[in-house]
Amino acid sequence: MTQSRIMMGTVVDMRVYGKSAEKAMEQAYAKIQEIENRMSVNLEGSEISQINKAAGLNPVKVSTETIAVLQKAIEFAQLTNGAFDPTIGPLVSAWGISTDHPRVPTVIEIDYLTDLINWQDVEIKAEENQVSLARPGMAIDLGAIAKGYAADEAVAVLRANGVESAFVNLGGNVYVIGAKPDNSPWRIGIRDPFAQEANSFVGVISATDTSVVTSGTYERYFVKNGVTYHHILDPKTGYPAESDLASVTIISPESIVADAVSTSTFLIGKEAGKALIESLPNVEAVLVDKDRNVWVSSGIRNQFEIAEGFALDETR
Ligand code: ADP
Ligand code: MG
């Protein structure tokens, strides 16, 4: 059974097999909607919007799941020395990322806004489920991690309903349950970041029971006066991050980790990214650099088939 719905600012596809497919899918979509209602910056009443409105004023009580996702984001802010930063909100708004009217902010705006970005100014009182932002104007944005969390939760709902084979895709954030109904592994194509067409690939991963998440500059961007501006921002400069990577794909049974690591690796670049990936348990990767070299982590090499026109980078 297959369905497609617009949620979390993207297309959420589910292909679910088995007797309970219909009911399971309905519940999984409902769970994603609940997460969006809590964590979206685009919904007035969401928990994240409430935290943002109270910035510099008072703490806000939120759900345990919002606290957990925020804590995971802060963990990656620490691991990347602040390259990944969930308080990126003011810059995301100024650039109009993912809106119908993106724009290049003025230098003065950028200068002012970069001062507002600092994950260390998020205070979490986990026992009371309270979050506060130290300074007015600060804002949390969980866009780099919330879809991964939603994928994990949707998959948990499907599994709790007895589903043993499924393919879930939240706008490029993929999770596969079990194998395909014919028992062969799922095959997930990694998009060629240099190609205009969406059906051109760097290679294919064969996988079961895992998440496959890609971050790249071709997903969301706009062009102004011949310059391309993408949606992953450098908190230090206030501009789209300049990376030596064209795309980062992370494979992990925890989609929240895959989502955080893919954005983080893009931000910190190839060498630091490899070190981050190798330091984390159950995290594998396919990195495509700007010179079309494809680096595949050791744990996934025999599940990856490279496409013609790309060179395998054999260094460890
Ligand atoms: P996508 O949403 O296209 O799957 P990512 O998971 O890489 O891509 O997340 C990009 C989103 O993360 C941006 O649209 C923005 O909301 C947010 N973001 C941008 N820059 C940063 C950053 N430096 N740290 C944390 N989040 C960021
Ligand atoms: Mg991400």
Image (cartoon, rainbow, N blue to C red):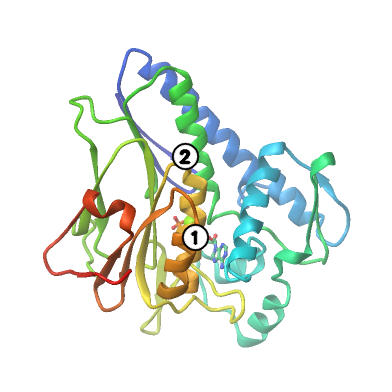
For the C terminus, which image quadrant?
Answer: bottom left
Q: Nearer the viewer, residue 197 or 300?
A: 300
Q: Quadrant of residue 225?
A: bottom left
Q: Residue at x 55, y 75 (%)?
A: 234
Q: Which mark is residue 260?
A: none
Task: List x then y, in percent, for residue 256.
Answer: 52, 47
Answer above or below: position of 181 versus 171.
above
Answer above or below: position of 282 versus 5.
below
Task: List x then y, in percent, for residue 218.
Answer: 35, 66
Q: Amino acid at mark 2?
A: Ala
Q: Residues within 10 Å of mark 2 (few under 14, many from 20)?
A: many
- Asked which secondary structure carries label 1, the reply is helix
Q: Is residue 177 left or right of residue 79?
A: left
Q: Residue at x 29, y 72 (%)?
A: 315
Residue 140 visible (yes or no) = yes
Q: Residue at x 48, y 32 (%)?
A: 154
Disc nearest the viewer among 1 and 2: 1
Q: Which mark is residue 279?
A: 1
Beta carbon of the mark 1 residue lies under 8 A of ligand 2: no
Residue 98 visible (yes or no) = no
Circle 2 is placed at which residue position?
151
Q: Nearer the viewer, residue 18 or 7?
A: 18
